[in-house]
Amino acid sequence: MFYLRGEFDLCTGCGSCLLACSNRAAGGYSPRLARLKILSERENLVNRPLVCLQCENPFCLNSCPFEAISRAEESAVVLIDKDKCTGCGNCINACPDKMIQLDLNHRADKCDLCAKDPLCIKYCVPGALKLVEKKGVA
Amino acid sequence: MSAYMGKLLYIDLSSKTSREVALDSELARQFVGGKGFGAKILYDLLPPGCDPLSEQNILMFMPGPITGTLAPAFRGCVVTKSPLTGTFADSYFGGHFAQEIRYCGYDGLIITGRATEPSYLYISEGTVEFRTAAGIWGFDTFATVEAIRAALNDDTVKTACIGPAGEKLVAFALINCEYNRHAGRAGTGAVMGSKNLKAVVLRGSKTVVPADPAGFAAAVDQAYSELAENETIRSFTVGGTAGSIDFANDEQLLPTHNYYNGQFEGASGLNSEAQRKHFWLRNVACAGCPIACGKVGLIKTGRHKHLVSDIVEYETAAMVGSNLGIGNVREVAYLVKKCDALGLDGMSAGGVAGFAIEAYQKGLITAADTGGVELKFGDADAVNYLLEAIASRSGLGDLLARGVKAAAVELGGKAADFAVHVKGLESPAWGPRSVPGMGLALATADRGGCHQRAFPILYECGGEWEEKPVDRLGLAGKGKIVAHLQNYLAALDTLVKCDFGQYGVKDVTYARLLETAVGEAYDVEKLMLLGERVWNLVRLFNLREGFTRADDTLPPRFTGEPLPTGPYAGARVPLEDLSRLLDEYYAARGWDSEGRPTAEKLKQLGLAELPKLIDIT
């Protein structure tokens, strides 16, 4: 399976990842609508990228009462079926990293890894975001 | 659809009311954003002769139509009338605040009036709250940001705030835009302080959508590749602007001992290598910027061990370092961070401290004025004393808080001879004596002594203009160069560009970004016309305030005192040379010999009979 990894030592906090992501996710530039976050710590000494890890034991998936969240067969990415989602908020409440939020249509929204070619990585000039493969998980 | 949010937010602190004002399409078309909006609105709304620290003055935070998108290296500006110079003032800031104005749904914030008690504004998802700042009045800028985040229980809000210096109306107080990003110059923080406004806090999640999303995305990718291919941009990524220390020192442009000379024996202690060695840990960037000229870290050794410091960028490394004879970058980092915390513009603070030290040497200030503190070059503790005295306006600090121009008048004697400023704004860290084009740029910059309105040094120090080498010490042709650069940069300041991004992003790409963002055709020629329109409107503002050709001048240190030693020993910009430069410059601008735009020029620029483009009644 593949997932994103964010590295605080390389992240510059520019948030270009958030802009590219939000434009795809929400049809316009707005960092708060991105499917990843960047934290600022210690007078901005540290910017910590926070990304969906496509967990092996996804709390979001497990907590959904409507079976709207599933794991894709080939890529193993955790995906939301917006037709099944009711916007109940269980997954949002369950994810400890707050990697799920409601989209503009009030449906749960999360990182889908852009079909294994993440836009956030394309615009991460300092190389703080990487696509990582975890073997032996499906 | 266009990248404009379609609204300006007008806030009157006196009546605690706010109102959304529809963005006039003609304002957008003729002035685009940023500096352009600021210039037009200030010209339209501010009564001539208005006291900058009165409630009538207007404080604007202006992004541009590209700010907040994925396009690399855009930011915002504060526009107001300066308490330091009495001119139009536009002061540019990076960080994330300007972008958040757009995510809040606005193309700009216009603030007037005066709150009856210390207050801050919390603007969140369409609501405007007037909150008390009683509990944080007196806090430094770092503590202010922390306290506001805690009060709102939100670490993601974006804050612009003043420190104690702004509260005390220090004429060169800044507005801090988290962290180490400031609307630094010309005293915008004093205007905010005069309004009893401690902070403006934003939280927004509206989207910015270009008129032509696919065309815009392609222009963004073009800008990214231009930045990636540019060597100057690479040098900013590696060493930030501190890399300019070596260049300025080699070229004898680095202010040393209150601009006595242009080379400093301790320069290698301040440059990017020294900073990397002593504290840098990682690159840090403003919103949407792949350049990342910031370099934050922890001081490793000495009495400031463990201090978090961002890069000491060139201007403050020079003004608080070499200009004060301090070559230990850990001390300079501490002092510059102190300026940031107190809310003092580090550039002016360095200029003022250099002036004070020289005044002490010459006996115009004595130990009786300083409470026994000896003022001397190379002494970080003496500078620390000065910064604290200025920010609290205690003792000698009350005089120095007015800036070098006013302080020199008060001190009398020969003080004006070594008060280094233009129109009251302390000069930036580029001594112009061996680069007369730069001298002209400083003399004619709209907000006073500023290097960001035109930077002909790049051409004068070994560069070419129109494919011909430029004679560094010569005068001919410099007026045209300065006028051209001012127009171009004024155009980009409507977008609002970052000064460093424009070293890499090409003019045609800026035009392409703008036209795909706002949905109106732009080419480079039209950009240049836009810049010229904005520059002329600002000139009209300053003329209306009473400025004349006589104010387009340089301080005696640059006109009368030659560089004492070094490769350009003997160089200066005599007043008669400056006069020739001004004649050529005014002619290149289509202005009369007194520096007034001619009726013909105003007509050509569409400024002859332009109505007010904002309705706040």
Image (cartoon, coloured by chain):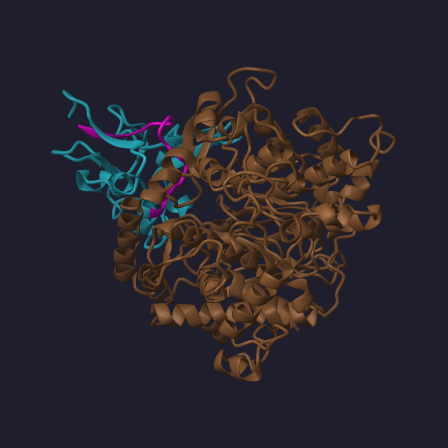
Residue B108 shows in this picture: yes
Q: Nearer the viewer, residue B486 or B64?
A: B486
The image position of residue B233, as x and y in percent, is: 35, 43
Chain A, hue in figure: cyan
The image position of residue B448, as x and y in percent, is: 63, 57
Q: Residue at x 17, y 31 (%)?
A: A76
What is the quadrant of residue B477 in the picture? bottom left
Q: Which of A122 and B389 is in front in this view?
A: B389
- Describe residue B120's horizontal placement relative to residue B222 as left or right: right
What is the quadrant of residue B579 in the picture? bottom right
The image position of residue B278, as x and y in percent, is: 48, 21
- Count of numbered tags: 0
What segment carries the magenta color? A1-19
Q: Which of A108 and B112 is in front in this view?
A: B112
On-image quarter of the C terminus of chain B: bottom right
Residue B22 shows in this picture: no
- Describe residue A118's horizontal placement relative to residue B546 as left or right: left
- Describe residue B434's horizontal placement relative to residue A81 as left or right: right
The image position of residue B292, as x and y in percent, is: 40, 39
Chain B, hue in figure: brown
Q: Which residue is drawn at 61% across and 16% down?
A: B303
Q: Which residue is drawn at 48% across and 45% down?
A: B96
Would residue B349 be counted in the magenta stretch?
Answer: no
Q: Which residue is drawn at 63% across and 42% down?
A: B345
What is the quadrant of residue B466 in the picture? bottom left
Would residue A9 be counted in the magenta stretch?
Answer: yes
Q: Which of A64 and A80 is in front in this view?
A: A80
Residue A75 to residue B2: above or below: above
